[in-house]
Structure formats: C-alpha cells, structure tokens
Amino acid sequence: MRIHSDLLPDVLVSETRLPRPFVCQVIRQAKAAGRISAGRPFAPPLTARDIARLVLALSAASPGTAVAHERDVGRLPLSEGDGPATVEAAIVALIEADQASGQIAIAPSFVEIRSPASGATYGSLPEGAATIFVISTSAVQAIACTLLKEGLHV
C-alpha cells in the first residue's frame, strides 16, 4: 500500500509538471506555516482550501517565497467580472463545483480565472511577484479528485 505522504507530491508533480524537489519543498513550507492540514501522528484529511493553497504556493518563484506568495495571491480581491471575492475562494469554488474546463493564470500584474461560464480578474500582485503560472482547471480538478477521494492525511 502507498504511503499517503508520497501520494501528495506524486499527484502535484504529475498534474503541474513541476520538479519533484520544488513541489516537496513547497509542501514542507506550507505545512510548517500552518497553511495546509498537517499534524502528528495523524493529520485531518486535506480540504478544497488546502488544495487551492497548494496550487497558489506552487505558482511562487521559489519554495522560500511560496507561503508569502500563496497568502498574497490568495487574498487578491475581485477586480473585474463575476466570481467569489478572492482568488483563494474562486479556486475553492471551482473545486467544489467540479468545474473541469478553463484555466487559472497568475501573471506579474493580475490573476485571471476563466471557465466557459464566466471569467474573473483579481487585483494586482504585490511588488516583486515575478511569476507566470498557468494551470488548467482540469488539472486542479484531477488533483482535487485524487486527493479528496483518497481522504489524504498529510
């Protein structure tokens, strides 16, 4: 049987195509900062919010900036279009609605979340957030489906 702590990075690497060492370091940083469910000897299962935070953290330029980047980007307010009030809430809503087409784009000047039904643009990234990250909502759904279905404890 697989050890659950291996499943989390495996799924994230598979769906994002980011290097495994980067993904593992981001996961460690997010756990240490209390941004995702973690505990010893047993943690509660991951939630849609945990997955949204991991996706945002993985969009950081480096593991060392992942937690601050995730917080800053996740809090960006809706500036144009229809959608939840913040980026984090919008990603959680996509996961919970099982929205599988569209994309999330994080650029140095904005965050855009597009689906066939709607589109929304969120705020301006903080100074120094020099990142470009695009992930399809189908990849986010695949991550959520695997990790939430497994009731993953990390």
Image (cartoon, rainbow, N blue to C red):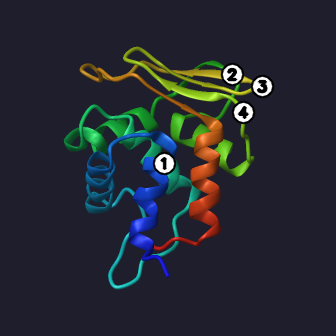
Pointer 4 or 3: first along the chain: 4
Which residue is the site of mark 3?
116
Q: Nearer the viewer, mark 4 or mark 3?
A: 4
Give me the disc on residue 90.
none
**Image-based side of 147 in relation to 123, left or right:** right
Q: Which residue is mark 1?
A: 14
Q: Residues within 10 Å of mark 4 (few under 14, many from 20)?
A: some
Q: Which residue is mark 2?
A: 119
**Circles 4, 1 touching at the beta carbon (< 8 Å):** no
Mark 1 to mark 3 CA distance (whole Å): 25 Å
**Disc 4 on helix, strand or loop?**
loop
Q: Residue 47: where, in percent of width, then height?
A: 55, 61
At label 1, counting other C-alpha atoms closer than 10 Å, the crowd grade (few under 14, some 14-19, many 20 or more) is some
Label 4–label 3 contact, CB within 8 A: yes
The answer to which image quadrant residue 145 occupies is: bottom right
| Image position of 111 with respect to 9: above or below | above
x, y percent for residue 49: 53, 53
Label drawn at residue 101: 4
Give the foreground label among 3 and 2.
3
Q: Secondary structure at mark 3?
A: loop
